[in-house]
Image (cartoon, rainbow, N blue to C red):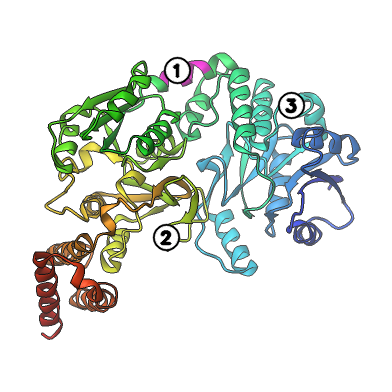
Amino acid sequence: MKAVSVILTVAENSRYANQCLQMLQAFLPKGQFEVITAARSQEKEEKENLSAAWNRAVQQAEGEYLFFLHDDVVLCRRTFSRLYHALQAQAGKGLVFPMSNRSHYPENQVYPDPYEDFQQLLQYAETVEQGFSGGERLLAEDACFFLTKETYQSIGRFAEEFSSGKCVLADYSLRLRDAGMPVTCVAAYIHHEPGGAELDGYGEKADHHWFEFKWGLPLWEPHCLWAEAIQKAKWQGRRTIQSVVAEYHQKLPLVSVMIPTYNRPQLFEQTLCSVLRQRYPALEILICDNSTDQRTEKLMEKYAHDPRVRYYRNAQAKTKAENFQPFEYLARGEYLQWLMDDDILADDKIWQMAAILMTKPQVTLCASRRGVIDETGKELGQLSQELDIRSMYALYDGNAIGHAVLTSGNNFIGEPSSVLFRRWDLAHHYWRAEAAGYAVISDVAMYMELMEKGDCVIFRDVLSWYRRHSGQEGQQIDVLLQSCVEWVRLLQSYYQRKVFVTTKKAYRETLAYWQQDWERRFTPHLAAAGDDMKKQYLALQQEIKAILGE
């Protein structure tokens, strides 16, 4: 085996560097490699970005093979040898890289079963190596890749106009393709820890805009939409990319973003701006306003020039339901995004979720982790979600998610603002602020219907923020008691049909858990409830006791 120079990217204050060095000593051939560090400290960031650090390290390297590695990557037994032999198989030309649990691009990513320690990780890696196939890819990953010094000298230095590893390797991949050299994903596995130095939002956006200017490829768009088409096209560099991107943009499904608003123009404008920042191009933004004053109407004059925005002054609507109803005939989109007028969307929320619906027909619902903000926009953390999502997103069986939501009485999927779905997958929509007869848990009723028809994708990252403030009706005791009644009715309806909850044991255990939980949380506050709601709640408790006593 020829000598290898390991170029180890080390982040400032990294807690992984020693672990990574131990991996190299354990899994690389003894005495046949050197380690050169490419450090990235905040003090050096303006003088030497990642690509510059890599170029400097290559100049110091004595090996004929260059193995680039971030220090927060965990190697497995055969990672290095598989990459080395794959590079040998293509006569040392081009670049090779492994699959991982945390990839920029889903086709290079595997979705591991939970592993708790290193031995379990090694066992999982062996299943990946045996059961998955790699292949040529459009763009490589920056966390771990392998090429020869001859290839580097042929293609030239890494482009130092980019700061992020993602853009540097995407640029290098396309330059390799221009030279007729392959970029290959190998059936070897790495575990990528959530460490390392991240660019701030501005730096990353600047990189992405410069990359698009150079190559015509918008890296912020989901890679799965255009990668295969570019791979299959007759390669003519930037001209091929522009042709493919223009063609698929014309075919994008329209997404209708529906914002009902009432008497809170300041919060509403923040919500609206989060939609206007969406990079998804096929978008219509519908606003129904039944405010009791003209503040929101006056505010909308600033946005009248935007062709995506359609504002409707719905002054005759006296209730929430009446303000929701026009969306049924106003919305023209194939995909629907409800957005409450105090919530916020991440810039890529619609792009990420729409790409899943476009490429995975078996998926009927997309959701993500959700953040929480207060009235001022200050982040308060994340809403709890008992899911271990180790990759960019996780794909769940619809029946399993439906069962988990229904038996826990916990809507961990999220509020209407947090999801995206196809219009035709629902019969009972949210058009009247209720679905299938449910008013308080109408979102859950919708999700259950969607889970009957397909699977659910939940993204690991926060893609929407739920705003907590005193004006929310969900905090009122009558609304909380009504939700208890509706949860039981929803459970009973699915148990009768033997969907999601199929056994008497599961049905009774769920009711028993709810009864104890509600007794602790709600019964002490009954004095503050309205008479009618109090009667319904007490009657429900008696009904549950009768069922459990059978």
Is there CB contact under 8 Å for labels 3 and 2? no
Residue that badge 3 annotates = 159
Corner quadrant of residue 135: top right
Apparent side of residue 44 relative to residue 338 in the rendered image (left or right):
right
Corner quadrant of residue 179: top right
Dot 2 crowding, Cα within 10 Å, few <14, some 14–19, many 20+: some
Residue that badge 1 annotates = 246
Dot 3 crowding, Cα within 10 Å, few <14, some 14–19, many 20+: some
Q: Kindly report the distance in space between the C-alpha atoms of the residues bearing marks 3 and 2.
A: 40 Å
In the displayed structure, 246 sits above or below 184; it is above
Residue that badge 2 annotates = 385
**Residue 326 sits inside the magenta stretch:** no
Q: Amino acid at mark 1?
A: Ala
Q: Regarding mark 3 in the picture, which secondary structure is present there? A: loop
Earlier in the chain: of badge 2 and badge 1, it is 1
Q: Amino acid at mark 2?
A: Gln
Q: Is residue 502 visible?
A: no
Dot 1 crowding, Cα within 10 Å, few <14, some 14–19, many 20+: few
Query: Which of labels 2 and 1 is toward the front?
Result: 2
In the displayed structure, 247 sits above or below 91; it is above
The residue stretch that appears in magenta: 242-247
Question: Camera-side residue: 110 or 506?
Answer: 506
Q: Kindly report the distance in space between the C-alpha atoms of the residues bearing marks 2 and 1.
A: 38 Å
Q: Regarding mark 1 in the picture, which secondary structure is present there? A: helix
Identify the residue at horizontal 37%, vertical 48% (top origin): 367
Is there CB contact under 8 Å for labels 1 and 3? no
